Image: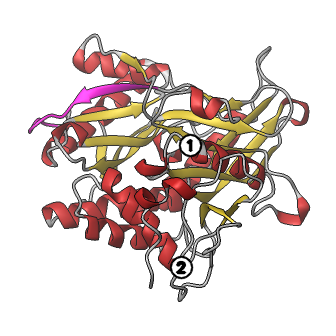
Amino acid sequence: MAAPPDATALHGNLPLSSSPTLHLTHPTLAEKEATWRLNGTAWRGALSLEAYLRREHHLASQPLTQHGGITYWILVDAAESTASADPKSPHPRTILASCETLRKRALVARRASAPTVTAITAHGIGSVFCAPALRKRGYAGRMMAELGRALAAHQQADGQSSLFNVLYSDIGKQFYARRGWHARESRHVSLPAVLGGEEQNGVGLRPLYAADLGALCEADERILRRRMGRWGVGGVDTRVAFVPDVETMAWHHAREEFAAREVLERRPEVKGAVVEGVEGRVWAVWTRTFGAGEEGNVLHVLRMVVGGEGGEEGEGAWSVEAAAEVLRAAQREAGRWAMKTVEVWNPERVVVVAARRIVGEVEVVERDEESITSLMWYGEGEVEWVGNEKYGWC
């Protein structure tokens, strides 16, 4: 298959980003792999480029991404004289920018229809990329403007309109905000990895394995629905959330398992930890990120649940201690895998209290440049993003 034209040789022939002939479309198989080769130089982390390509194929075959669960997009010029969508063509299209979207189960709750919570389809956007030789020309911005319009109807049933989609910016808040994705709460707490250490006797702590996650994710969805359907006085009138379902967790775990096998020839079996007692249940599901260097090795808590099955939030002494023990388990697991830190995104207050019980004055970091959670809202009025945690990332 012919490779896309070398962008460095095209400067004299590149269209303006405002050109009416630019359009968003889907790549051929060859073009899709070409985008991976381009962005893999920046995002492969500890993987070789060839391993990164295999990983992308692997991630495209997960339950979350099968059967249209992932959609690939490219910005091209329809007027390009050599343009062709035929993979056998000797004149492939110039890929001006690229990205992908993951279809996700989501929920919406409205004060006016309380306590009803409705299931909807929404999308997460990832892998937004423009080749270095094509940057500063407005192509990524044009692609995102086109994508925002396309996702309003993409994969929606019966002619319905989408309500929202999200992305995670690594270039600050302004670029995407100008195109409709407004920054949301982007905080985290970080705990150091711990080598060794013992669990507290009698606390009811046990590790979580892949086989445990289906039932826990179902319980989590019930809890999330109850919380979203409970309204107090004041505040916004609409809430949305991604469902923290087992397919989402399995996609994250497919990433870590692939990297662990390639880099360390090991398989991460422990997927989280849970504390169970007569007072309730507290758990966390996590994943390991293997960076290009030590600082990039992070055990990320995908989802942490503290509170009752009825949706009430846990704030008492038992909840704090149980949350602390789950975090200690995460620290020990991070140590076993040579992770630098444990991160919890947008932690509830009880989780911050628990973290401070472990390490003293833990800082709640406000991210300004990387992993800025950003939401495009197609509806009216203000909206609250519930469950804005790492599991939503893609």
From the viewer's perspective, tell me whether residue 51 is left or right of residue 186: left
Tell which of 257 and 26 is nearer to you: 26
x, y percentage for residue 196?
8, 39
Callout 1 touching callout 2 (CB < 8 Å): no
Q: Determine if residue 346 is in view.
A: yes
The residue lying at 14 percent from left, 67 percent from top is 265
Label 1: how many Cα within 10 Å (few below 14, some 14–19, many 20+): some
> Nearest the camera: 51 or 174?
174
Is residue 188 a member of the stretch shown in magenta? yes
- In the current view of this chain or complex, which residue is farthest to the front? 12
Q: Amino acid at mark 2?
A: His
Report the side of 126 relative to 327 (left or right).
right
Q: At 62% across and 76% down in the image, what residue appears? A: 67
| Viewport quadrant of the N terminus | bottom left
Span of residues in magenta: 187-198
Marks 1 and 2, Cα distance to the nearest angstrom?
23 Å
Q: Which mark is residue 91?
A: 2
To which residue does mark 1 refer?
137
Residue kind at label 1, given as amino acid type: Arg
SS at badge 2: loop
Q: Residue at x 52, y 51 (%)?
A: 126
Question: Going by the image, does 59 lie left or right of 308?
Answer: left
